[in-house]
Image (cartoon, rainbow, N blue to C red):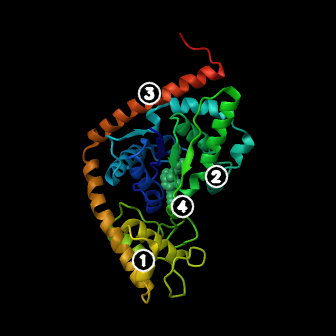
Amino acid sequence: RARVLSGIQPTSDSFHLGNYLGAVRQWVALQEDFEAYYFIPDMHAITVPHDPKTLAERTRRSVAQLLAVGVDPERSTIYVQSHIPEIAELTWVLQCITGFGEASRMTQFKDKSAKQGVDAAGVGLFTYPILMAADILAFQVDRVPVGEDQRQHLELTRDLAQRFNSRFGKTFKIPQAHIVKEFAKIYDLQNPTAKMSKSAETDKGLINLLDEPKKSAKKIRSAVTDTDTEIRFDPENKPGVSNLLTIQSALSGTPIDVLVDKYQGKGYGDLKVDTADVLTEFVTPLRGRVAEYMDDPAELDAILARGAERARSVASSTLRSVYDKVGFLPPR
Ligand code: TYM
């Protein structure tokens, strides 16, 4: 069976709607047809200043959320990145074939380092995309379901795999990004030309799945739209309205054109109220399921232990052939 792999950082207490619609929802669908590897990149989470007291808790919480949205540990291998030391070992080798200029062109590094001041940024933030390449290449995967903001990192991953293969002989499978265009970029409700992100200046435009539904409903009712009154799907000229239509369509399963027809002669208020209702219906049971999983940390840890065992067997076989190809003397 073809393989699929993806990760979500444990840098927040809750997934946001962009994470879910852009990526995690695809993970759930893809586990039906692919051999799936889904993981929590805790090593990526320390590339920016972080609080050690909350990291482990957020890592478990991320796993609880994956289970709650339908990632099935019987079907998918679920693990924590730092439990697979082969990933860090592979990263070193990949770093040695990555150009300094090539790494310097990563736009996410430019954005994130600018926020901290370039001199304050850690070297780990710079090499972040190479760790991500190792995450993927260690597992010889076919598809990587992510949002639009990860596209450049996937391109780098493919370049590194091709370069390694041509220099040292065929070793890595060349992975493909799996980006679902309609949902690949969910926008900030207050600033609907910027992606929804936990690192936005305010969280007024950010919908966290685990927040109190009333709080999220209020954010949706205060979403920025435009001075026009017509409800149509036109991301260029009506980004706020189009974002709400996208969100409501994704959560309800009603196609966007059906929604647009339904809103003829109605106002933005109706669109917002309905979108808030659909969200509330989705998150209410989800919050309950996450709380149940969080009540049983031993069960979560058991799932992760099984996942790590399976994941390590795959990653270690890739690493063995990489070490062999680059000419490392095998230990005896
Ligand atoms: P992260 O943790 O920032 O986000 C998790 C996933 O959510 C997607 N996403 C969005 N999609 C649509 N609209 C948005 N507004 C939005 N915001 C976030 C992201 O594209 C991502 O798919 N580097 C990765 C984690 C990672 C990874 C990997 C992913 C580490 N190793 C290997 C795939 C394969 C990241 O920071 O995602």
Crowding around mark 2 (Cα neighbors within 10 Å: few <14, some 14 to 19, many 20+) is: some
Q: Is residue 124 visible?
A: no
Looking at the rendered structure, the secondary structure element under dot 1 is helix
The numbered mark at residue 259 is 1
Q: Is residue 260 visible?
A: yes
Residue that carries the numbered disc 4 in the rendered image:
181
Residue that carries the numbered disc 3 in the rendered image:
313
Residue at horizontal 46%, vertical 38%? 81
The reply, left or right, for residue 34 in relation to residue 135 is left
Residue that carries the numbered disc 2 in the rendered image:
113
Q: Are marks 3 and 1 in contact (CB under 8 Å)?
A: no
| Image quarter hosting the N terminus | top left
Q: Looking at this view, is 196 or 211 the one in front?
A: 196
Label 4 and label 2: CA atoms lie apart by 28 Å
Q: Which numbered disc flags the more N-terminal residue, 4 or 2?
A: 2
Residue 100 on image: x %, y %: 73, 40
Q: Residue furthest bottom?
A: 265
Residue at horizontal 61%, vertical 42%? 157
Label 3 and label 1: CA atoms lie apart by 47 Å
Q: Which numbered disc flags the more N-terminal residue, 4 or 1?
A: 4
